[in-house]
C-alpha cells in the first residue's frame, strides 16, 4: 500500500529536541516525513488458514481439524498465519555513555529514544506488534510486543521515564533478549555499542539463531566521530568516572582510529550474519535515519 | 679549553628565547571533558601522551641546540691551547710579521736571521690551505700586503732603532672585526727582550682576540763583539776613549781602527775575555782638527752592525746641571760647581721640585737631587730615557721618612736592594778617602776630609763605594741603572744643612766637581748622542730656525724646521746646516740595546693564555704539518645538520584522520 508524501517538511533533531513530549515528537516525525515512505515488508499476511500438517501424537488435540478427519480419516492440524504482520522489538541502550552530547546536538540517548518512539509508532500504525527492551548492564525494562494504541502509549511513557545510567553491557542484553523471544521477528537495536565487540557479536549471533531479523543502529555523536580536542584534555568516562590526561593529538588519533576499528569489526560481523548495521549521527534528520532503516527492510526477503 | 674568536656573536644566544616562547605558548590549558568512553584510550594513549610530551621537550632541546651551535659557528670557537688550530681553517687569513730589527742581521750558519725568518714564512705559505689568504708586513709601506707581492729587498728592509710590535698587533686586531675568518698573526723574530716585552705589554693591556704564533729564530749560542762607546776624551784631549765588549765568546785578537772619512788615523789591537769589556784609548793628537770619525772593530763576529761607532771630535763643551731642591739649601752646590769651572758646568739651574719642567730635565746632563722629598710624576719618565742617559747625584735629607723618598718613589730601574736606613750618632764622622792616587782622588790629600763633621748618614747605599766615612760606611757610591743612567748616592746631605758641615769646608768644591765628573764620565755626558731610528726632540722646534741635514756623501736627507720630533734612520755622521750659522755634525750610532743579545721568549699574560704560542723555527714547521685536518667549525656544522634532522624526525604534524 503506497501513501503519498505529506506536505510537511522534515524536522531537524534540534527542533525535535525542543519538544518535550516524546509521543508528540514521534508523531511529528512519523506524520511529517515518514508515513509516505513506508511500505511493510510483511504485507499480505493475516489470520487466515495457511496449511495442514500431520498431527504428531502427544500434541494438543485442540488444533486438530476434525472435519478433515471426518472426510479423510486423517488427523491433521490446521496452521494459521499470525494475527499481526510483525513482532518487532526495539532494544535501546540507556547506559551512561548514551548521555554524551556535544554542544549543539541532542544527547545520544535522547536521539535514540526519539528514534525508537518513532519506529514504534510507525510499526503500530501498520498493525505490527512492537515491544521494547531497555538495557544498561542489566535489562531495566522489558515490554512484550503488541500492536495496540494503548501499548504504544506504554512504550512512550517508559521511554520518557527512563534516564541514562549504568554501564553498557550490550552483548549480555542481546543474549538475554534472544533467550526470551520465541517467534520470528525483528529486533532493532539502538545503542552506541561501547562494549566488547566479541560479546556484541555473540549476542547478535544468538538473535540470528532465534530467527530474528536484526537492525543495528549505532548512535554516534558527530564530536565522537571527529574527535579533535584543541588542547590537552582531562577526559572523564561517563560510565566509570575514570579520568585520563591526554595529549590532544594522541587523543584524536586513538579515539578516531579506535571508534572506526570497533565499528568496522561489528559491521563486518553484521554483514556475515546478514544484519543491517547503520551508523546514525545525532545531528542527522530523523526521517533520513528512518528512511535508511525502512529502506533496508524493504530489500529484505 | 675552548675560546672564541668572535665572542660578540654570543649575543645571538638571545634567540633561544624564540623556541622557548614557542614551547611555552604552545602549551595550552588542560580542558576537562566528560566523554562517552575511555575504552579506546586506556591501553596506549596515556603512554603515547607522555612520549609526545617528552618529544616536545626533546624538540625544544634540539631547537635550542641548533641555535647554540649556529651561534658557536659564527663565534668561531677554537682550541684555546692550540693557536695552530687556525691553520686548519680553509678560509683563514694569516698575517706574518718579520722582525726588521738590525739584530736580525745576525749571521748564523752562513745566513742572516731575517733570511731564515723569510724562508720560514715562505714554508708557512706553502703549507696553508689553498683558499687561505696570506699577508706580510711591508716595512717599506708600513702595512700588511699580499704575500705574493712582497719583495724581500724592498718590503723587508732592515730598520735601525727600537722596533715595536704593538702597532702591528693593533692593526691585526682591527682586521679581526672586518674579516670573516679569525686571522692568525705569525711573528718571526729573534725575540730580544724589547720585542718580548712589547708583546707582553700589548697582550696584558689589550688582551688577545686572535691567535698569535711567535716563531723564534734566535741563534742557539749567540756571541758578539761590539764597540760600546767611543768619544774624544775630555780629560785627555789627545785620546779617543771608548770601550769594547765581548759577549758569549772571548775575543783573542781584534783590530780597532779609527777613521776620519777614508783616512785611518789610529789603530790598536785588543783582546777581551768572554762576557767582559775593555776600555781603549787611541791617540788622535794629530787628527784633532778633524770634526768627526768612526771606530771600526775588525772581527769576524756574526753581528757586524755594532762594529762601527761614530764619534765627534769636538763635543759639546759645557755640561748642563739641574739642581732640584730648596734653593737656599742647594745654593752651595751650584756655587761650588760654578767656582770649579764656569766653562764646563754651564748652566747650573736650580729648581724647586714642584717647578721642575720637562724641558729642564730633558736638557740636563746632570741632575742633582738635593733633599728632594718628591719628584713630579710628569717628569719621572724623562729620567729614564735610554737614549739620553744622565748622571744623577742624590743628596738625601736627614729626615727618616723622606730622606730617600725621592728615589724610592720613582721607578729607579735600580736592582732591588736593602733600603737604606738613617744612622744618628752623637760623635761626628769625617771623610776618609780610599786612596789619593787613583784617577778619581788624584790630587786630594789624605787628611783633607778630617775637617768634615757628619752626624747623620744613610747606610747601606747602592753600588760601588767611592768615598768612605771614617768608621767604614760609604759616604758616596756609584752605580748604573738598567737604562744607562749613572747614579752617585751620598750618605748625607751635600747642600746647606745642620747635620754636617761639608759645604763649609774647603774640600767641598773640588769634591763636588770630582764626583760629578765621575758620574758624568760613565755616561760620556757632553756628547750629544743620537741613536739611529729613534725619535727625538727637534732641536730647532719653535726656534724659528730651519736646518738641512746631509749625510756623509753630502746628500740632503731631511729638513728640520718646526716639526716637534725628528729621526735619523741609519748610523753615520750627519751635517746639520742652518741658515747663517756654522754647520754642526752629529754622530748617529746603533741602539746599544741591539748589541745585547738577551733573548727571552714572551710569556703570554692571563688574558692571552692559550692564544699565544711561541715556538722555535723547526718546531713551527713541524707543528704546521701536524695541524688538525678537521676544524672545529666543521664538527659544529655536522652537529647542526644532525640536529636539524632530529628536528625533522621529532616534529609531528597535526593529526588528520
Image (cartoon, coloured by chain):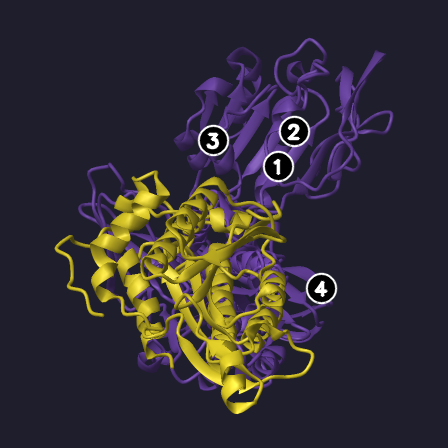
Observer-nearest residue: B436 or B50? B50
Question: Is residue B491 shown left or right of residue A151?
Answer: right
Gap between marks 4 and 3 measured at Cα: 35 Å
Quarter placement of the C terminus of chain B: bottom left
- Please report whichever mark, 4 or 3, sits nearer to the chain's N-terminal start: 4
- Please report whichever mark, 3 or 2, sits nearer to the chain's N-terminal start: 3
Colour yellow, chain: A
**Which element is circle 3 on?**
loop
Residue that carries the numbered disc 3 in the rendered image: B379
Residue that carries the numbered disc 1 in the rendered image: B412
Query: What residue appears at the point 40 percent right and 45 percent down from the top-left corner?
Result: A153
Gap between marks 4 and 1 measured at Cα: 25 Å
Q: Quadrant of residue B543?
A: top left
Residue A258: in sight, yes or no? yes
The answer to whether the residue labelled 3 contacts the one labelled 1, judged by CB atoms less than 8 Å apart, is no
Residue that carries the numbered disc 2 in the rendered image: B408
The answer to whether the residue labelled 4 contacts the one labelled 1, judged by CB atoms less than 8 Å apart, is no
The 10 Å Cα crowd at callout 1, few under 14, some 14 to 19, many 20 or more, is some
Question: Is residue B200 shown left or right of residue B382?
Answer: right
The percent position of residue B238, horizontal first and vertical second, equals 52, 55
Chain at tag 1? B
For marks 4 and 3, give the one nearer the viewer: 3
The percent position of residue A217, horizontal first and vertical second, equals 43, 64
For marks 4 and 1, give the one nearer the viewer: 1
Give above or below for B409 relative to B95: above
Residue that carries the numbered disc 4 in the rendered image: B275
- Please report whichever mark, 4 or 1, sits nearer to the chain's N-terminal start: 4
Colour purple, chain: B
Q: Quadrant of residue B623?
A: bottom right
Chain at tag 3? B
The 10 Å Cα crowd at callout 4, few under 14, some 14 to 19, many 20 or more, is some
Gap between marks 4 and 2 measured at Cα: 31 Å
Amino acid at each position: 500500500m503506497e501513501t503519498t508524501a505529506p506536505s510537511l517538511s522534515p524536522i531537524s533533531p534540534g527542533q525535535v529536541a525542543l519538544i518535550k513530549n516524546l509521543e508528540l515528537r514521534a508523531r511529528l516525525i512519523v506524520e511529517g516525513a515518514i508515513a509516505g515512505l513506508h511500505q511493510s515488508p510483511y504485507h499480505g499476511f493475516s489470520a487466515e488458514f495457511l496449511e495442514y500438517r500431520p498431527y504428531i501424537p502427544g500434541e494438543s488435540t485442540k488444533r486438530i481439524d476434525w472435519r478433515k478427519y471426518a472426510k479423510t480419516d486423517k488427523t491433521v492440524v490446521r496452521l494459521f498465519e499470525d494475527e499481526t504482520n510483525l513482532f518487532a522489538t526495539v532494544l535501546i541502550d540507556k547506559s551512561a555513555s548514551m548521555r554524551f552530547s556535544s554542544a549543539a546536538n541532542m544527547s545520544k540517548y535522547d536521539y535514540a529514544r526519539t528514534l525508537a518512539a518513532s519506529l514504534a509508532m510507525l510499526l503500530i500504525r501498520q498493525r505490527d506488534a512492537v515491544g521494547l527492551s531497555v538495557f544498561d548492564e542489566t535489562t531495566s525494562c522489558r515490554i512484550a510486543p503488541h500492536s495496540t494504541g494503548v501499548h504504544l502509549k506504554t512504550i512512550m511513557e517508559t521511554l520518557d521515564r527512563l534516564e541514562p545510567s549504568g554501564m553498557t553491557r550490550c552483548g549480555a542484553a542481546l543474549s538475554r533478549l534472544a533467550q526470551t523471544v520465541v517467534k520470528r521477528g525483528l529486533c532493532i537495536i539502538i545503542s552506541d555499542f561501547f562494549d566488547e565487540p566479541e560479546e556484541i557479536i555473540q549476542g547478535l549471533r544468538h538473535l540470528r539463531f532465534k530467527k530474528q531479523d536484526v537492525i543495528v543502529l549505532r548512535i554516534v555523536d558527530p564530536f565522537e566521530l571527529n574527535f579533535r580536542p584543541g588542547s590537552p584534555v582531562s577526559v572523564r568516562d561517563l560510565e566509570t568516572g575514570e579520568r585520563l590526561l591526554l595529549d590532544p593529538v594522541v587523543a584524536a588519533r586513538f579515539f578516531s582510529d579506535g571508534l572506526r576499528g570497533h565499528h568496522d569489526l561489528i559491521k563486518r560481523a553484521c554483514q556475515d550474519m546478514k544484519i543491517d548495521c547503520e551508523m546514525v549521527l545525532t545531528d542527522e534528520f530523523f526521517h533520513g535515519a528512518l528512511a535508511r532503516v525502512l529502506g533496508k527492510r524493504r530489500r529484505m526477503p | 679549553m675552548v675560546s672564541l674568536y668572535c665572542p660578540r656573536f654570543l649575543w645571538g644566544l638571545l634567540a633561544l628565547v624564540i623556541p622557548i616562547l614557542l614551547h611555552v605558548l604552545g602549551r595550552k590549558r588542560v580542558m576537562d571533558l566528560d566523554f562517552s568512553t575511555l575504552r579506546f584510550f586506556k591501553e596506549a594513549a596515556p603512554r603515547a601522551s607522555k612520549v609526545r610530551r617528552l618529544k616536545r621537550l626533546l624538540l625544544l632541546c634540539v631547537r635550542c641546540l641548533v641555535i647554540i651551535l649556529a651561534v658557536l659557528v659564527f663565534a668561531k670557537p677554537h682550541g684555546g691551547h692550540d693557536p695552530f688550530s687556525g691553520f686548519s681553517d680553509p678560509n683563514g687569513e694569516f698575517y706574518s710579521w718579520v722582525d726588521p730589527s738590525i739584530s736580525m742581521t745576525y749571521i748564523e750558519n752562513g745566513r742572516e736571521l731575517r733570511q731564515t725568518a723569510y724562508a720560514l714564512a715562505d714554508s708557512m705559505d706553502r703549507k696553508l690551505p689553498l683558499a687561505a689568504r696570506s699577508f706580510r708586513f711591508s716595512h717599506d709601506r708600513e702595512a700588511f700586503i699580499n704575500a705574493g707581492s712582497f719583495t724581500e729587498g724592498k718590503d723587508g728592509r732592515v730598520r735601525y732603532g727600537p722596533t715595536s710590535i704593538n702597532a702591528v698587533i693593533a692593526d691585526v686586531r682591527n682586521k679581526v672585526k672586518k674579516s670573516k675568518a679569525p686571522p692568525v698573526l705569525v711573528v718571526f723574530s729573534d725575540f730580544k727582550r724589547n720585542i718580548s716585552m712589547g708583546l707582553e705589554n700589548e697582550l696584558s693591556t689589550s688582551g688577545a682576540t686572535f691567535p698569535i704564533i711567535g716563531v723564534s729564530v734566535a741563534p742557539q749560542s749567540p756571541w758578539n763583539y761590539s764597540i760600546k762607546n767611543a768619544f774624544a776624551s775630555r780629560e785627555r784631549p789627545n785620546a779617543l776613549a771608548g770601550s769594547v765588549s765581548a759577549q758569549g765568546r772571548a775575543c783573542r785578537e781584534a783590530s780597532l781602527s779609527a777613521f776620519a772619512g777614508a783616512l785611518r788615523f789610529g789603530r790598536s789591537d785588543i783582546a777581551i775575555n768572554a762576557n767582559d769589556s775593555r776600555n781603549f784609548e787611541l791617540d788622535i793628537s794629530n787628527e784633532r782638527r778633524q770634526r768627526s770619525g768612526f771606530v771600526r772593530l775588525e772581527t769576524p763576529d756574526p753581528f757586524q752592525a755594532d762594529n762601527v761607532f761614530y764619534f765627534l771630535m769636538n763635543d759639546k763643551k759645557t755640561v748642563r746641571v739641574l739642581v732640584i731642591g730648596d734653593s737656599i739649601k742647594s745654593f752651595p752646590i751650584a756655587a761650588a760647581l760654578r767656582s770649579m769651572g764656569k766653562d764646563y758646568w754651564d748652566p747650573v739651574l736650580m729648581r724647586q721640585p714642584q717647578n721642575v719642567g720637562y724641558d729642564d730635565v730633558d736638557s740636563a746632563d746632570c741632575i742633582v737631587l738635593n733633599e728632594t722629598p718628591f719628584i713630579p710624576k710628569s717628569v719621572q719618565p724623562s729620567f729614564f730615557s735610554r737614549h739620553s742617559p744622565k748622571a744623577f747625584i742624590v743628596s738625601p735629607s736627614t729626615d727618616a721618612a723622606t730622606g730617600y723618598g725621592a728615589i724610592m718613589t720613582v721607578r729607579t730601574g735600580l736592582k732591588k736592594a736593602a733600603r737604606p736606613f738613617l744612622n744618628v750618632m752623637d760623635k761626628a764622622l769625617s771623610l776618609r778617602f780610599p786612596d789619593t792616587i787613583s784617577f778619581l782622588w788624584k790630587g786630594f790629600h789624605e787628611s783633607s776630609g778630617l775637617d768634615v763633621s757628619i752626624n747623620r748618614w744613610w747606610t747601606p747605599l747602592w753600588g760601588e763605594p767611592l768615598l768612605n766615612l771614617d768608621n767604614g760606611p760609604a759616604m758616596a757610591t756609584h752605580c748604573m741603572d738598567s737604562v744607562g743612567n749613572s747614579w752617585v748616592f751620598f750618605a748625607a746631605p751635600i747642600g746647606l744643612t745642620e747635620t754636617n758641615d761639608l759645604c763649609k769646608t774647603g774640600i767641598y768644591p773640588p769634591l763636588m766637581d770630582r764626583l760629578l765628573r765621575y758620574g758624568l764620565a760613565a755616561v760620556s755626558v757632553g756628547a750629544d748622542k743620537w741613536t739611529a731610528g729613534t725619535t727625538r726632540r727637534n732641536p730647532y722646534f719653535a726656534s724659528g730656525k730651519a736646518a738641512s741635514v746631509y749625510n756623509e756623501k753630502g746628500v740632503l736627507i731631511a729638513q728640520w724646521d718646526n716639526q716637534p720630533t725628528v729621526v735619523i734612520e741609519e748610523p753615520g755622521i750627519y751635517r746639520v746646516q742652518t741658515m747663517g750659522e756654522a754647520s754642526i755634525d752629529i754622530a748617529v750610532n746603533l741602539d746599544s740595546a741591539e748589541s745585547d743579545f738577551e733573548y727571552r721568549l714572551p710569556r703570554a699574560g692571563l688574558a692571552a693564555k692559550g692564544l699565544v704560542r711561541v715556538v722555535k723555527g723547526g718546531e713551527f714547521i713541524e707543528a704546521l704539518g701536524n695541524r688538525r685536518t678537521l676544524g672545529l667549525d666543521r664538527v659544529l656544522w655536522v652537529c647542526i645538520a644532525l640536529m636539524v634532522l632530529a628536528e625533522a624526525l621529532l616534529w609531528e604534524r597535526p593529526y588528520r584522520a
